[in-house]
Image (cartoon, helix red, strand yellow):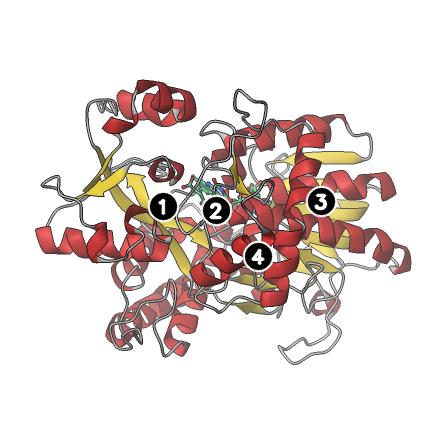
Amino acid sequence: MKHYCDFLIIGSGIAGLSYALKVAPHGRVIILTKSNLDETATHYAQGGIAAVMYDPDSYEKHIHDTIIAGAGLNNEKVVRFTIEESTERIKDLIEMGAMFDRNIEGDFDLAREGGHSEKRIFHHKDQTGAEIQRALTLQIREHPNITVLENYFAIEIITQHHLGVEITRRSPNITCYGAYVLNPNTGKVDTFISKLTLIATGGSGTVYGSTTNPVVATGDGVSIVYRAKGEVENMEFVQFHPTSLYSPGETPAFLITEAIRGAGAILKTIKGEEFMQKYDERASLAPRDIVARAIDSEMKLSGSDHVFLDARHLGKEKLLNHFPTIYAHCLSKGIDILRDMIPVVPAAHYQCGGIKIDEFGRNNIGNLYATGEVACSGLHGANRLASNSLLEAAVFSHRAAMHAIQAVHGVEQNINIPEWDSEGTVLNEEMVLITQTLRELNSIMSSYVGIVRSNLRLHRAFTRLNILYDETEELFKRSVVTKEICELRNMINVGYLIIRMAQDRKESRGLHYSLDYPPVK
Ligand code: FAD
Ligand code: SIN
């Protein structure tokens, strides 16, 4: 079956939906999402969205904090315009219906998080992402130009390769004509032909054994674009959030927002002693890479499976008002955060690298945009500052939309696209092959490509991953496409990119820490 539109959007988090609402007055929009519309990382965001609003904060301070966290690998021009546009994008979200908490004077109740020198985090209790997702979803559902297709899985973008032209990484003018997508109603692959395509598929945390990311975060967008010979960069910078709830077997790992440390909660060892001062003068409010490594080191020293976060002194009113989700979730696990310290452990959280984009969200593949966590804009450098992710998605989706509205007039829809070729495939009945390979991938990535790396660990990871790669490509060729085999293939591809880029980086910087290249003091 063929579908036609002006703007094809793959992904329904903040990046996809905010772009959709801006381009929709200018053409027909289709949003594809591989799960329900609101099953996204956006929905789970707790802490908030960073933006400059009041004195004594300033754009210069936020720019400075972002570059310090990013270990100087950020693109300074991108950092500057992203932060200078932050206030406008917050106003857009409010106009779209998102509500952020205010204090009794009626001003926004701004919170602070690690690495921020001022209070600048707009939040809705500890459910900021759910609030943004709610507001955007409401508008999307009512828009007459937008069609939402839930449980549709994008497999590949369509380029000249599918017209029989040989495409290599050096080919000029690679162009995207749309995407091949698994239709959940028929089990067949449909052809979506679009003038412009946005990849907004989010991150890839599920490549690791323990992650705060929802199950949809399988790195599909990066993998799809890399296979189509699009540029991808900085994949070695995987952010581990320092404080996920230590609750063995719980998937995804439940996040304990950094905002709780911003409010004064303190990290303590298994014996109840503070330790962060040993590692950084900003103590519990140091940037995430430093805090995650410090926790990793303390766990190794003590042989324990977790450390503690002590929020007891914050008091009932603060904890229940600002952090009701965390309070309720911990209580459901038998932990009363008013009386008990919270056991916490780092977990894979955010992909700083991704599809390489320019200042309007464009990749080297023509007619293709990417925004949100899937993209690498240059904002984060070697480590993302807390709450700069939702901001980046809002800023770049706006910029991409403004560009796309102009560009769409000059694009002819390519209608001579062949249907998906499924010749030679047979039914795949062996789910165990997929689940077992996924377990092996998770184990390789967590054991050898985690918070602390070395040449030997990366080499081991690469050798083992190669076996999984060969087996999975073989399986993919024989199988009728399913979401599961495609996701596995994409995750292995992302694992490969993380390892190869980590091997190429001969230094310790930001989130990439190698025992063979100790940081220069
Ligand atoms: P997502 O919101 O993840 O949406 C991705 C979409 O793509 C989903 O709809 C998914 O179904 C779809 N998709 C993926 N692959 C396919 C495919 N093959 N076919 C079709 N559809 C596909 N950041 C902050 O700035 N502040 C915070 O407080 C914060 N808290 C966080 C808390 C948690 C627990 C997590 C996990 C992340 C948090 N982050 C936070 C990070 C932030 O939430 C994400 O980076 C951001 O929401 C990503 O938005 P997105 O639109 O790019 O992707
Ligand atoms: C958190 O609330 O700690 C997550 C914030 C983020 O990932 O930016």
Q: Amino acid at mark 2?
A: Ala
Q: Amino acid at mark 3?
A: Tyr
Q: Amino acid at mark 4?
A: Glu
Q: Does 461 sit above or below residue 185?
A: below
Q: Secondary structure at mark 4?
A: helix
Residue indicated by mark 1: 211
Q: Does 486 sit above or below residue 265?
A: below
On residue 60, which mark appears?
4
Residue indicated by mark 3: 19
| Dot 1 and dot 2 residues touching (CB under 8 Å) | yes
* Residue positioned 31% across, 43% down in the render: 243
Ligand 1 within 8 angstroms of badge 1 C-beta: yes
In the image, 283 versus 471, the foreground residue is 283
* Residue positioned 46% across, 55% down in the render: 384
Q: Secondary structure at mark 1?
A: loop
Q: Quadrant of the N terminus?
A: top right
Ligand 1 within 8 angstroms of badge 2 C-beta: yes
Mark 3 or mark 1: which comes first in sequence?
A: 3
| Dot 3 and dot 1 residues touching (CB under 8 Å) | no
